[in-house]
Amino acid sequence: MHPAIPIALVFIGCCSNVVFLELLVKEDPGAGNIVTFAQFLFISIEGFFFTVKCGTKAPSIPISTYVVMVALFFVVNVVNNQALNFNIAMPLHMIFRAGSLMANLVLGVFILNRRYTLSKYLSVLVITLGIAMSTIASAGRVVSDHSICKNNDDIDEQGDGFSEMIRWLIGIAMLTFALFMSARMGIYQETVYAKFGKHPSEALFYNHALPLPGFILLAKDIYDHGVAFSSSAPMLIPVIGITAPKMWIYLIGNIITQYVCIRSVFILTTECTSLTVTLVVTLRKFISLIFSIIYFRNPFTVYHWIGTAFVFGGTFVFTGVVDKLRQVFAPTIKPVSKTD
């Protein structure tokens, strides 16, 4: 496959997936559990038929080894999606998730005793400052949106503003927790793959299939939101000309684009270098962020922009993209030969 195809599919699949997710949470901020469950179920069904061949193909990695990986994967996805129900705007959500390198470096130092170059430590510091700046700017938005009345007699409004800020702080704590849990999962995957070899399709299936029983704990919430989805306003599907509740259409769109996104990244890792993969994924996140700001008119101050520049700039420096691009585009200077 020509590399241009998976690159295009990464941008189309992953960017449109974020659009469908934002359409869902704009209508129902608490829809994280049903979205996560639907994604896990769809990928599990697809993997059952095409990866494990209806259960006839034995896993290359022992199931017992997958248990820890699955637990981490399940928690990270549920917490990340559920954080959107705690006053977390989608742009801030994306900025946090773009800061995964920071968490990876920190855990790499403390768990694997790794040492990095000074430039990597500095780039992670820049990423951390960018996340902190974006978070503080978002805190100001929460305060302004739910301003506390200066009149001491208005106790209800004061309590309202305070409770909204507490909800937002819980959301920030959830994003931070998920960020480091995701990094811990990456380290665990690294050790597992070093021992048993890389089997990404298999891991994708078991990471989504084994946690499915865990959704029983969330069954009531999923059912309630399913009922709410069914009662949402009808919407015409242009391609097939069928009218259905728009929330179910958004959810189906999210599931399909999530699958395209994951599969495209997997194909990209087999067709391109890790540098190209990092560059494509980082640019995809940045485009998704810009689209979310412009199309959905999410509040974004100059401090958010500075924080975003720090996060993505630090990511490019950390991964060596800047140095590689400089080598590619820098003119080749031939040494002057000396003659007698």
Image (cartoon, rainbow, N blue to C red):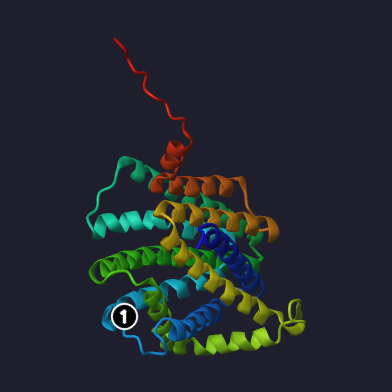
Residue 306 vertical position relative to residue 98 in the rendered view, above or below: above
Q: How far across and down, in percent of the image, does residue 71 sit? A: 36, 78
- Which of the two residues, 30 or 69, is positioned nearer the viewer here? 69
Of residues 290 and 125, the one nearer the viewer is 290
Q: Nearer the viewer, residue 306 or 246?
A: 246
Residue 283 visible in the snapshot: yes
> Number of numbered discs present?
1
Give the farthest residue toward the top.
Answer: 340
Q: Is 118 left or right of 96, judged from the image as shown?
A: left
- Residue type, numbered disc 1: Val
The image quarter containing residue 266 is bottom left
Please say whether residue 149 is visible from this viewpoint: no
Q: Residue at x 66, y 66 (%)?
A: 154
**How far across and down, in percent of the image, does residue 304 sit?**
57, 49
Left or right: 203, with 89 as reference point? left
Residue 23 in the image: state x and y as whole percent: 66, 70
What residue is rendered at 57% in x and 56% in y?
Answer: 138
- Quarter holding the C terminus is top left
What residue is shown with label 1? 67
Residue at the far front in the pictured view? 340
Q: Name the residue located 48 percent from the left edge and 67 percent from the top edge.
A: 170
Q: Position of residue 126 (x, y in %)?
A: 43, 45
Q: Is residue 114 left or right of residue 308?
A: left
- Considering the numbered disc 1 on the image, is that residue within a helix, a strand or a loop? helix
- Specify the quadrant of the image occupied by residue 242: bottom right
Q: Quadrant of residue 12?
A: bottom right
